[in-house]
Image (spheres, grey):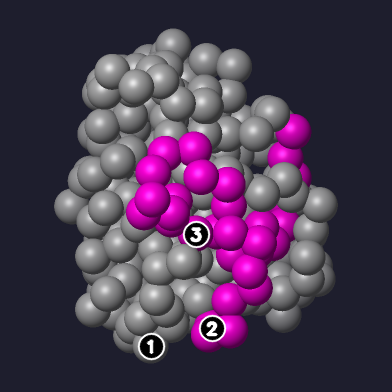
Amino acid sequence: MTSGPLTRIPPNGRTAPDTAAESRPPVVPKRRRTGHNGPIAPPASTGRGAPPSPEVPSVPLPRVVAFSASINRPSRTRTLVEAIAAELGRHRRIDLTVIDLIDAGPGLGALTRDDLSEAAEALVAAIEGADALIVGTPVYKGAYSGLFKHVFDFVGAEALVGLPVALAATGGGLRHALVVEHSLRPLFGFFSAHIAPTSVYAGGDEIADGVVADATVAARIEAAGRELDALLAVSRGADRAKAPAA
Ligand SMILES: Cc1cc2nc3c(=O)[nH]c(=O)nc-3n(C[C@H](O)[C@H](O)[C@H](O)COP(=O)(O)O)c2cc1C
């Protein structure tokens, strides 16, 4: 996977505001693009505020793909999947790639996989090659967006079997919060993925200016990241997942 111009997510980043008394920086960098973030690691055990380790890991890390199916930039959905990835990165070292659907461009609108553009094929291949997925979609007309489903219609039926997956969605309000349960969860059930029990939905003002601004959503992000970590430990990518903490 090629490197992209993405800013690295701080491995000690958290959502804001936090329920704990301590105050932490927002989890999401302001300017970001699709691409390979590279390794991110849990914070050092010696205490808060420790700088990220500059060392390059010598063992393969679990390849985590965070996919946001938004066609907007900035994107609230992107904020959500990045926040879950950052939370997972607090538990273990990961090799993170964040992908925006918008970067696949109009070449995604093909009828067959053979006709996908290079960028769109790379998106589908990255999903198939991941050791864990964080998927997010904006809610369109009470369900996942059509383009989100279109992407997964190209994914091989066996490609995600046993794959740890965290589910996320954003909407304009709270009316469709159960889209994560009624649309996303059955889709990944079809793929026989190992789905994190806690899915994350943010509506309305729960994400503001690229930051998660609701304590309940933040708590669910924490839970989803923790659960994804646990699923990775017993997944088919467990060899990579055994990489020791920094
Ligand atoms: C075509 C369209 C349909 C939408 N349908 C819904 C909907 O049914 N329910 C809802 O809560 N929000 C709906 N929205 C609002 C988006 O889900 C919401 O703005 C979302 O957070 C956008 O995510 P993004 O910033 O990642 O693109 C719709 C928006 C569009 C453009």
* Residue 231 point in image, percent of width and height: 25, 68
Q: Residue at x 47, y 20 (%)?
A: 207
Image position of 165 with respect to 146: above or below: below
Write down the region rendered in magenta: 31-60
- Of badges 1 and 3, the one in the foreground is 3
Image position of 76 with respect to 84: above or below: above
Image mark for residue 41 = 3
Image position of 116 with respect to 207: above or below: below
Q: Residue at x 47, y 75 (%)?
A: 62
Mark 3 and mark 1 in contact (Cβ < 8 Å)? no
First in residue order: circle 1 vs circle 2? 2
Residue underneath mark 1:
239
Q: In the current view of this chain or complex, which residue is farthest to the front? A: 46
Left or right: where 246 falls relative to 91 = right
- Find numbered disc 3 in the image and state the secondary structure of the residue it sits on: loop
* Residue 175 point in image, percent of width and height: 28, 19
First in residue order: circle 2 vs circle 3? 3
Residue toward you, 135 or 240:
240
Residue underneath mark 2:
60
Amino acid identity at mark 1: Asp
Mark 2 and mark 1 in contact (Cβ < 8 Å)? yes
Give the class, few, some or many, for how many residues have Cα within 10 Å of label 2's Cα (few <14, many ≥20). some
Give the class, few, some or many, for how many residues have Cα within 10 Å of label 1's Cα (few <14, many ≥20). some
Residue 229 appears anywhere in the view: yes
Cα distance between the residues tagged 1 and 2? 8 Å
Q: Which quarter of the rendered picture does the N terminus lie within?
A: bottom right
Secondary structure that dominates the magenta span: loop
